[in-house]
């Protein structure tokens, strides 16, 4: 490999475009699936981690990427850096379109390696890739940076040492930044950015989280990554690349597959292909480098990207390369809080709403009502992928909207967005998984919007076949319920995948009586089966009750809260449908263990709970703790005298006392305000007879042990 890369660098120095194209084609074919993981080093590191764990019994955070560890630089890594530096200089020259395409594809492959990014995080490199990607409103980089030069022979870049030989150029040439950027693109191809599938934003308690999902994926900081020296123009010449990298989701491939890329590019011209390759490489660099994120912020890359998106929105059809522009916008708003705030202040919600309308070809009827065409074909993959990127960015910039009181203008903006999101929920997609993913990101955004702006979800006229409750259209609520059931069936990543829709349905049920009434009919129909525990079975109620004892606190709280709201926060009714044992957690948290809670909430109506004949007949035999009719069992104290029963009771008390004294258990009782409190201060003093009896038991136990 060393000789091949060295030969490529020499061809670049000589300006031999034909040789460069031929050799880079071979290089790209060889490394198409390569992410530069060192298997031997991985095994050595795992062994060190195992030894460290055995010594300390503590496992520290370990990034998924092998590139995050600073190791001695090998020859191949140095060559990759030199090749990247040479290519950044080379693509600024007048090149044949095919040569430019293959050079950018090589840069995209190298940009996967976080240790080889040093030449790609300079101002010149970032601006060059941005211009080639179609973001032409940014200033074009200078021909040569005053500082920051890499000597190609010693691992440093010095563009002045490279001279393009004009006589060796052949064919037509294409100058970056010229009219080649004026063509539209088709949103196809593969993206090797290390899987960014869920939104990272701030949660409502101020912590970083991911939307996939309103899933809470924490944006961690990795302090183990390589510290490569980069000297920037207009920056401190001695500064080093910050080794802290924003983490989204490591190790997962992008939804756009490698095979799709080659097939889709067969019909594209070179201009379209190189713009996509430039954007892919730029996304990889921004994703993998904290330094690049900072420079992108200083270079106003977001402003140029916004202008590019506005041009696409105002055009008759969306540019084909818009997917990668949207992906880059998502990365910038996810990884840079100041850019997130800036984009929101620059009416980013309006811009992305318009982009979503254009992407889905929205047609408006009455106010805040999107017309649907039942005969329309399912949404294709490319359209759904663009819509998902828009939704992820929307979540990033609206995550805190629910905590704020919107003014009249903001409320109108959010209501228009909610109407489009309702359309997203109802849209059929080409593939069930794709439809579920689109619905998931839509739910994330809906959960972030102010609750008073979600009334448009119900403000749709009834039509033939519509679900309804109290004369209100429930099609959207029904779609959300079906989506929740799918997530329940999946059974994995419940915190990220399920809690957003649970919270959304809970809040909607509190705010809208018709929604609560419809969901109660579907989830909590009148009880008929009383021989099984509430958590046994396959109904939605059974599955939600099972989640009430889930190991994840957030999951069990969200499931219990939804059922509690559907019971109109009535303790008796809640225990009836879930059993006291399952309900104890939520009741304890709310101070309702005594069964007496605050007065009924004003938002709930006073309609009574209708019991079935089966339930009324078995009501007196239902165990309130388990929530079912228990099988009759023989009395264990049958045939015992009163003295024997009293002795067994004292023995049981003695056992509890020993467990409490040894701090194995802590007896607690329900206080007047319905909360648990230790019984230590309320327990009566033991009588002398009880103490003597306990001492006798201890002596008998010691004698048995001696025997």
Image (cartoon, rainbow, N blue to C red):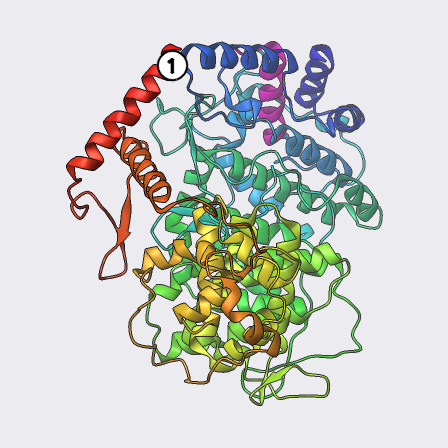
Residue ID for mark 1: 705
The structure residue drawn at horizontal position 58% and vertical position 76%, both measured from the top left corner, is 521
Q: Is residue 319 magenta?
A: no
Q: Position of residue 621 (x, y in %)?
A: 52, 65
Judge whether residue 286 can be spotted in this image.
yes
Question: Which is nearer the eye, 88 or 669?
Answer: 669
Q: Main secondary structure of the magenta part?
A: helix
Q: Is residue 653 left or right of residue 99?
A: left
The image shows a total of numbered marks equal to 1
Q: Is residue 86 magenta?
A: yes
Compared to residue 30, the image places residue 644 above or below, namely below
User: What range is drawn magenta here?
Assistant: 72-89
Q: Position of residue 474 (x, y in %)?
A: 60, 79
The structure residue drawn at horizontal position 58% and vertical position 71%, both measured from the top left corner, is 527
Compared to residue 71, the image places residue 61 above or below, namely below
The structure residue drawn at horizontal position 17% and vertical position 48%, both measured from the top left corner, is 682
Label 1 packing within 10 angstroms: few (<14), some (14-19), many (20+):
few
Label 1: which secondary element? helix
Q: Position of residue 353 (x, y in %)?
A: 54, 68
Quadrant for residue 695, please give it. Answer: top left
Question: Which is nearer the eye, 646 or 182?
Answer: 646
Q: Position of residue 87 (x, y in %)?
A: 63, 28
């Amino acid at each position: 490999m060393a000789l091949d890369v060295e030969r490529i660098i020499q061809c670049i120095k000589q300006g031999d475009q034909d040789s460069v194209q031929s050799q880079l084609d071979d290089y790209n074919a060889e490394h198409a699936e390569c992410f530069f993981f060192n298997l031997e080093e991985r095994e050595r590191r795992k062994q060190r981690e195992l030894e460290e764990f055995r010594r300390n019994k503590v496992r520290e955070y370990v990034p998924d990427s092998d590139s995050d560890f600073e190791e001695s630089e090998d020859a191949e890594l140095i060559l990759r850096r030199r090749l990247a530096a040479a290519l950044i200089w080379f693509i600024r020259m007048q090149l044949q379109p095919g040569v430019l395409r293959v050079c950018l594809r090589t840069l995209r492959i190298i940009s996967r390696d976080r240790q080889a990014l040093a030449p790609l995080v300079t101002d010149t490199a970032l601006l060059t890739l941005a211009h080639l990607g179609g973001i032409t409103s940014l200033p074009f980089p200078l021909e040569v940076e005053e500082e920051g030069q890499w000597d190609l022979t010693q691992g440093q870049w010095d563009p002045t040492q490279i001279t393009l030989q004009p006589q060796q150029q052949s064919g037509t040439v294409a100058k970056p930044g010229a009219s080649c950027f004026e063509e539209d693109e088709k949103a196809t191809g593969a993206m090797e950015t290390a899987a960014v599938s869920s939104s990272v934003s701030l949660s409502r308690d101020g912590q970083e989280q991911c939307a996939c999902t309103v899933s809470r994926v924490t944006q961690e900081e990795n302090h183990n990554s390589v510290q490569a020296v980069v000297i920037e123009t207009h920056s401190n010449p001695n500064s080093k690349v910050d080794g802290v990298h924003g983490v989204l989701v490591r190790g997962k491939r992008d939804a756009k597959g490698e095979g799709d890329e080659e097939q889709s590019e067969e019909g594209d011209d070179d201009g379209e292909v190189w713009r996509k390759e430039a954007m892919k490489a730029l996304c990889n660099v921004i994703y993998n480098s904290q330094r690049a994120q900072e420079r992108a912020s200083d270079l106003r890359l977001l402003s140029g990207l916004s202008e590019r998106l506005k041009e696409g929105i105002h055009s008759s059809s969306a540019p084909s390369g818009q997917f990668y522009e949207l992906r880059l916008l998502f990365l910038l708003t996810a990884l840079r809080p100041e850019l997130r705030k800036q984009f929101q202040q620059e009416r980013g919600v309006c811009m992305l709403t318009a982009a979503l309308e254009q992407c889905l070809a929205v047609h408006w009827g009455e106010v805040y009502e999107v017309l649907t065409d039942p005969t329309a074909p399912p949404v294709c993959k490319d359209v759904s992928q663009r819509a998902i990127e828009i939704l992820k960015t929307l979540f990033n910039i609206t995550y805190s909207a629910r905590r704020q009181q919107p003014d009249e203008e903001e409320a109108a903006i959010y209501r228009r967005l909610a109407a489009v999101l309702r359309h997203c929920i109802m849209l059929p997609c080409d593939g069930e998984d794709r439809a579920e993913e689109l619905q998931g990101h839509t739910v994330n955004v809906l959960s972030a919007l102010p609750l008073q702006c979600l009334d448009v979800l119900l403000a749709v006229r009834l039509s033939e076949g519509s679900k309804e409750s109290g004369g209100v259209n429930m099609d959207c609520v029904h779609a959300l319920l079906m989506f929740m059931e799918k997530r329940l069936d999946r059974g994995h990543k419940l915190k990220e995948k399920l809690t957003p829709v649970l919270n959304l349905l809970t809040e909607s049920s509190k705010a809208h009586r018709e929604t609560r009434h419809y969901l109660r009919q579907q989830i909590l129909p009148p009880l008929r089966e009383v021989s099984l525990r509430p958590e046994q079975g396959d109904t939605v109620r059974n599955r939600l009750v099972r989640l009430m004892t889930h190991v994840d606190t957030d999951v069990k709280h969200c499931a219990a809260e939804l059922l509690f709201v559907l019971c109109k926060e009535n303790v008796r009714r809640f225990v009836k449908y879930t059993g006291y044992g399952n309900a104890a957690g939520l009741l304890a948290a709310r101070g309702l263990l005594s069964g007496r809670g605050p007065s009924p909430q004003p938002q709930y109506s006073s309609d009574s709970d209708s019991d079935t004949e089966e339930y009324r007949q078995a009501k007196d035999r239902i165990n309130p703790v388990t929530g079912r009719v228990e099988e009759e069992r023989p009395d264990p104290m049958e045939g015992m005298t009163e003295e024997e029963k009293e002795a067994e009771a004292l023995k049981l008390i003695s056992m509890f006392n020993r467990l409490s004294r040894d701090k194995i258990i802590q007896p607690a009782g329900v206080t007047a305000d319905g909360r648990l409190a230790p019984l230590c201060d309320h327990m009566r003093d033991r009588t002398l007879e009880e103490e003597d009896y306990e001492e006798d038991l201890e002596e008998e136990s010691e004698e048995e042990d001696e025997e």
